[in-house]
Image (cartoon, rainbow, N blue to C red):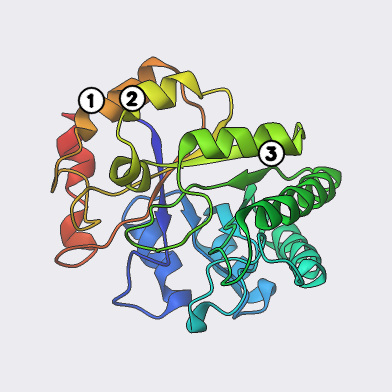
Amino acid sequence: MPTFAANLTMLFNELQFLDRFGAAAKAGFTGVEFLFPYDFEPERIAAQLDKHQLQMVLHNLPAGNWAAGERGIACHPGRVQEFRDGVEQAIRYAKVLGTQRINCLVGILPQGVERAAAQQVLVQNLKFAAERLKEEGLPLLVEPINTFDIPGFFLSGTRQALELIDAVASDNLFLQYDIYHMQRMEGELAATIKANLHLIRHIQLADNPGRFEPGTGEINYRYLLALLDEIKYQGWVGCEYKPRNGTVDGLGWRGALAA
């Protein structure tokens, strides 16, 4: 069975953010991830990680004005300096938190911007970020996201992500593979994971429909999780789902799928 990380943006929402670390540890998680740490000073988060002996698996680069609907700015012409400043901010947090990998949400295609122009700025931004993070020993990831949940998201499929990685041509840019998002966009989950294992540095899960716990929908998680063991996937699997009836009550899937 793979090693699971609790996504504290999605799980344990019954609690305030800084209280979720202890709840995750009590529930048996040894690693955590979340979208962003930037609402808190890194030392406050690090204290929770240390107290509960948790590994900081992943967080994202700053992604613009999230409350206003932005989902990343890496493909936004005219905001290159803001993106670069965000890379430096992410590094500062990662050093304190011991973060193992950084993900880039590339963003929604801005109105009035041609795809070719967005692609050009995205490639240049990722070149910068991959090189800068490499200097700090941090891998950079990109994540395709389904366009049902986030209409207009610029990076929405595995093939597109692979072409983007080729265009950036960095040995420090990898794929974050979200099973839920890719089930909605393309299917072929097992074959895609096997074919691209060499580039996948992080996997996330949720079932479909609803983005609830594994075992609540159409995805055969018993098969997929066994497959990850079979092909010797060495990374974490982030539990980025919406608990249907409370986080703790919904954690039984871990034992059920392992049986």
The residue depicted at 28 percent of the width and 28 percent of the height is: 224
The type of residue carrying mark 3 is Leu
Instruction: Say left or right for 185 vs 201.
Output: left
- Disc 2, SS: helix
The Cα–Cα distance between marks 3 and 2, rounded to whole angstroms, is: 22 Å
The residue depicted at 69 percent of the width and 31 percent of the height is: 166
The Cα–Cα distance between marks 3 and 1, rounded to whole angstroms, is: 28 Å
Which of marks 1 and 3 precedes in the sequence? 3
Residue 84 percent coordinates (x, y):
80, 64
Q: In the rendering, which numbered label is found on residue 190?
A: 2
Which of marks 2 and 1 precedes in the sequence? 2
- Crowdedness of circle 1 by 10 Å Cα count: few (<14), some, many (20+)? few
* Residue matched to label 3: 173
In which quarter of the view is residue 178 placed?
A: top left
Mark 1 in CB contact with mark 2 (< 8 angstroms): yes
- Depth order, front residue of 114/7: 114
Question: Where 86 sits versus 67, above or below?
Answer: above
**Residue furthest out toward the top:** 230
